[in-house]
Image (cartoon, rainbow, N blue to C red):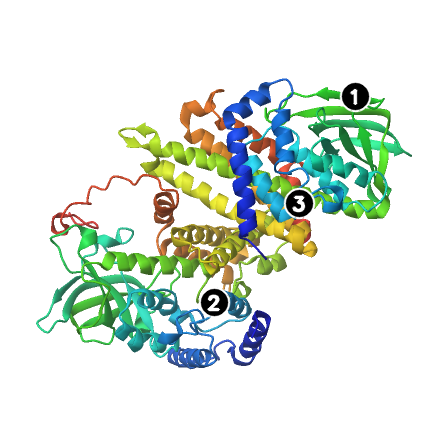
Amino acid sequence: MDLEEYQRCARTWLAANAPGARAEGATEEDGLAAAKDFMARLYDAGYSGITWPAEWGGQGLTQAEERAFATEASEVTLPTYVFSIGLGMCGPTLVDLGTPEQKTRHIKKLLRGEDIWCQLFSEPGAGSDVASLQTRAVPSDDGGWVVNGQKVWTSVAQHADYGLLLARTDVDVPKHKGLTMFIVDMHADGVTVRPLKDMTGRAHFNEIFFDDVYIAPGNVVGQVNDGWSCAVTTLLHERLSISSGVGMSGQRDNPASFDSLRKIVDTSDPLVRDGLVELHIRSRALALFNAKLSQETKAGVFPGARGSAAKLLLAELVNFQADLAVSLAGPEAVAYEGAGGLAGAIALAPAMSLGGGTNEIMRNIIGDRVLNLPPEPRVDKNVPFKDLKVGTQS
Amino acid sequence: MKLVLSAEQRELRTAVRGFLGTASPLSKVREDAEGPDGYDRAVYRRLNGELGLAGLIVPEEYGGAGAGHADLAVALEETGAALLPGPLLATVFATIVLTELPEGGAVKELLPGIASGTTVATVAPFPGQPGAVTASGDTLSGELPAVPNGADADVILVVAGTGDQVTVHAVEAGAQGVGRTPLTTLDLTRRQARVTLDHAHGRLAGGGEAAGRALARAFDLASVALAAEQLGVLRAGLDAIVAYSRIRMAFGRQIGSYQAVKHKLADMHCKLEQADAIVRYAAWAADESPAELAEAAALAQAYVGRACFEVARGQLLLHGGIGFTWEHDAHLYYKRAKSDEVLFGPSRTHRTRLADLVI
């Protein structure tokens, strides 16, 4: 099947299968069941895990098909948000680093939406400096592990079946050298998930408490004490998936988008036109940069740390766009009856700069790994973790 | 849409970069720019003889290479990065106009000379550039206050009149009634001249509605070519400050290790990535998607022109005091970037053009 044919089939399938808005009065559980049902049909039709290896349950196709499908999917709203962490970060990490047994156990169910995944890295005392995390995992007698600690900013954890956990397994070595990555069962005894209300007034993420949580043998990802390099793999996938919009609905639903704004503002005003054209320029510049990265990927040149530039630019664009939209719309945007789309957009905008690494961390990565600038001196680099002060502890 | 270079284009880039690295390094650029001609005629001849740059997009039947605008963009990015002095870009603008104009007239007779590098040519005025010329038959009168390489050119393609009444004429530089006054330019590496036409003879190269359409497309193509040069200037300026940031010490550390410096460089890198993608896209549209060209060209000028200057200014400032000295190269990028940014009119005109196309 050639690419055009592939894209045409995808369009037809989406037209027939993409669900509309959630029915009025439907509960969150109804929504989750519908999302899982959709994901199963998406997988069975061959549109989940398009580029993932066929031997683990993917389709084994190329970026070209992935892009063709994404082009069609951006025209509709898909209920895939709850799967986005698994599809964008945890799954790709398992594909890269998991054992054959782990891949057999998890990849297909993840792609089919049978299991929902979350990512458990950040802690109250370890955000940008995530390697200073304090959650401990100690070996149990049977070759498994016991985990104690607290995680935070965890999207979709309230629905998650599994989590990719980063925990400290050695406190006598410097902070990067004593971490291990685990697959953790989110339904295990001792796991407590508590919603965390953010500045939008909604709970987009959670805090998680681990109290003597047992992890069975066979759930270490990569090597013990090599968790940092595994985490870097996950974070690379995270930045790429954020910048390329995996699991995000299209601009069509965005009240601050160029097309939405154009309909509500006075486009004869030269200053309005200048604002709109700036939004258009920035949007096109980033869209073309992302397209270039995906063409390079297809040609075998992997973006690596350059994905951080795409993530930084997206964060800046989202903040600029929401700011512009509210400024152009005026007072009605911040005092309203009903939904208040633009108020939601300006309240949510900072999330894009904070989630997946702050703008400042992205700039450090671009400087260190793309431009090969000298790193900042690290005072904690050779200090055993147990002698380090982290977070705001005194 | 094609945003990455082909193997042939990478070879072209290597060839042009290699040639300029030895034939026209920055130390020589500075020397040539301050010399009597403003550029080295021997280098210009080799550029056309060995690499065929002036004739790159000229059809093979007229002695050119018959290459596309995406190839041209690769070459101009390198000449931009090298801050090559002289009339290459002006001559490329002329080849663009001549290849776009319908067959007939004086047009195609000029192309072989330009393609071989023996004829230096320029165009004036493109939209946004100052000056107005009226034509009575093939007799031209008017003033062109700032013509790129106007004093170097053997032939000036003069655009007279507007709308359906537009005509394009080839004016021999030495013809009677042609006055040329070299100007002092901010950018040392690219000269300009005021040209006056007092009943000067200009062979008709095209006119009427068809010529108007050809000129509109030629302006878009020239905007893409200019953006390719700007991309090169941006890239080279950024490379220079990144290299310096790795070796310059302050307070016991390389300055590139400070976030105050590193974060500015990261932002400049983001501009480079986006400028690169836009130039590749616009050059692709020039070759493959005529319907997208006008918008792509306006986007290229609106984004890349500004980004180029911002990066050129940023790199100069991060060099510290040495960047403000005459002997340092930082100001050469800065001045080329600012001159390029306004070459086709004030930058707001590109934004206005884009706004009219998309809003």
Sequence order check, earlier mark of 1 and 3: 1
Q: Mark 2 lies on which chain?
A: A
Q: What element carries label 2?
A: loop
Numbered badge on residue B352: 3
Residue B29 visible in the snapshot:
yes
Q: Kindly identify the amino acid type of the residue bearing the numbered disc 3.
A: Thr
Closer mark to the observer between disc 3 and disc 2: 2
Numbered badge on residue A62: 2
Q: Quadrant of the N terminus of chain A?
A: bottom right
Q: Residue furthest top?
A: B36
Q: Mark 3 lies on which chain?
A: B
Q: What element carries label 1?
A: strand
The one of B65 and B104 positioned closer to us in this rendering? B65
Q: Is mark 3 on a helix, strand or loop?
A: helix
Q: Residue furthest front?
A: B50
Residue B222 in the image: above or below residue B320: below
Tell me the quarter of the picture where residue A54 sits. Answer: bottom left
Q: Mark 1 lies on which chain?
A: B
Residue B36 in the image: above or below residue A77: above
Rendering coords of residue B284 (x, y %): 62, 52
Label 3 near label 1: C-beta < 8 Å?
A: no
Rendering coords of residue B46 (x, y %): 62, 31
As drawn, is A373 to the left or to the right of A247?
Answer: left
Label 1 near label 2: C-beta < 8 Å?
A: no
Numbered badge on residue B179: 1
Residue B116 in the image: above or below residue A285: above
As drawn, is A284 to the left or to the right of B253?
Answer: right
